[in-house]
Image (tube, helix red, strand yellow):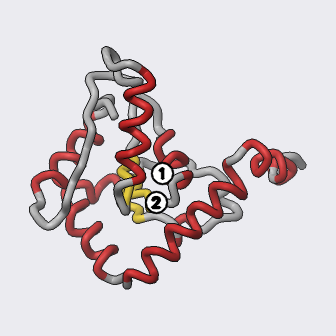
Amino acid sequence: GGITHELRLQALQVLNDNYDIKCDFVLRHGFWAPGVPKDVAIKEFNENIQNSIYGFCCRGAGNFSFRFGEVLSHGRIPVLVDSDCVLPFEHKIDWSEHACIIPQDEIKNIDSLLLEYHNKKTTSQIIKIQEENRRVWKEYFTPLGFVKHLGDFIE
């Protein structure tokens, strides 16, 4: 993604500097990969998520992350930098069971917090979280899934 917020840059630097974490960040010079053919950018973006256990999700220009849903769609685990953002379906989903959530004020420790999260889990638990995340995406984030739950927002 593009470096559209200082918080994103700080987190990426801390993660990238930790030799115990294998990072495969694809950095672009702006929103929607300017200068890169869209089909190439989309293919690289999806392959990058698919080839990872975790997906980095941090606010950009707005206090939300499109990538959060995209990471779930691939059945991966979001590493969410929580900048007091509102997550979808918070009233139904305990996101702490589906993501490694890092408080914004702990950004300098994102590497150790991610490693702690990962090391407390077995391979089977990681796979189960990934399977659940794909299920959650299908249930809540697909057009049909969203429409099925639209009534939750109407009183």
On screen, residue 134 above or below 86: below
Coordinates of residue 4 in the picture (x, y in percent): 32, 29
Residue 75 visible in this rendered orientation of the protein:
yes
Q: Is residue 83 above or below residue 19?
A: above
The count of marks equals 2
- Within 10 Å of the Cα at label 2, are there few (<14), some (14-19), or many (20+) other Cα atoms? many
Q: CA distance from mark 2 to mark 1?
A: 5 Å
Position of 114 compared to 126: left or right? left
Residue found farthest to the top: 35
* Along the viewing direction, whichever of 88 and 142 lies nearer the viewer: 142
For badge 2, the amino acid type reads Arg
- Tell me what residue is drawn at x 42 percent, y 53 percent: 50
Q: Quadrant of the N terminus?
A: top left
Q: Nearer the viewer, residue 72 or 41?
A: 41
Q: Are marks 2 and 1 in contact (CB under 8 Å)?
A: yes
Question: Is residue 96 at least partly visible in the picture?
Answer: no
**Secondary structure of residue under mark 1:** helix
Q: Residue beneath label 2, please?
A: 76
| Quadrant hosting residue 79 | bottom left
Image location (x, y in percent) of residue 80: 41, 54
Q: Identify the residue shown where x is 63% and y is 55%.
A: 137
